[in-house]
Image (spheres, grey):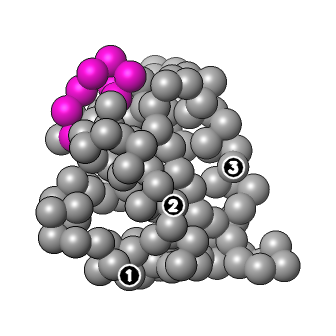
Amino acid sequence: MVGLLLVGHSADVVRGVLAMVAQAAPAVPTGGAGGLAGGRLGTNAVDATEALRATLEASGGDGVVALLDLGSAAMALEIALEALEPGERERVMATDAPFVEGAVLAAVASAGGASLAGVRAAAESARAMAKLPRA
């Protein structure tokens, strides 16, 4: 089953989104990295690398879709990807999909058996989600 990796700037936000994902699709492998020591905001590439490795392993070879909260989280993910072997890197897809909505939709797609590309597409479909009733 395709796993999800959340890389963010706040440990609380990452934990919260992981909790939503766990309620929506409890069987989906997940990992997260967010925040710095002392509760400070930021991203830690070492934490992202550990979370990526664990999630990739838990996916059983199906791969991982990585979601980022803010642009600079991409640097932590880049460093994490560099730590992987080329064959492992091929099983990771990053997306700039909305962090919360994208994670939930991706998790539901993964739980339904979607492919790696399908899970990323589900996350990215969150961009078109209406949050308010359309007139």
Task: Look at 36% across and 52% down and name the residue there.
Answer: 56
Q: Secondary structure at mark 3?
A: helix
Residue beneath label 2, please? 51
> Which of the marked residues, 1 or 3, is nearer the chain's N terminus?
3
Q: Nearer the viewer, residue 96 or 36?
A: 36
Q: Can you tell which quarter of the image residue 128 is in?
A: top left
Quadrant of the rendered structure where residue 17 is?
Answer: top right
- Graded by Cα atoms within 10 Å as few (under 14), some (14 to 19) or many (20 or more), the crowding at tag 1 reads some
Q: Quadrant of the N terminus?
A: top left
- Between 74 and 80, the one lying in front of the other is 80
Q: Residue 13 in the image: x percent, y percent?
A: 69, 54
Name the residue carrying label 3: 15
Marks 1 and 3: CB-CB under 8 Å?
no
Q: What is the distance, in whole Å, between disc 1 and disc 2 at their CAs?
A: 12 Å
Question: Is the C-beta separation of discs 1 and 2 under 8 Å?
Answer: no
Residue located at (33% from left, 26% from top):
109
Question: Which residues make up the magenta segment?
Answer: 109-116
Position of 40 with respect to 88 (left or right) is: right
Indicate whether 30 appears above or below 73. Answer: above
Q: Residues within 10 Å of mark 2 (few under 14, many from 20)?
A: many
- Which of marks 2 and 1 precedes in the sequence? 2
Q: CA distance from mark 1 to mark 3?
A: 22 Å
* Residue highlighted by disc 1: 79
Eyeballing the image, is 117 above or below 79? above
Given the image, on which type of amino acid does mark 2 rest? Ala
Q: Is residue 114 magenta?
A: yes
The amino acid sitting under disc 3 is Arg
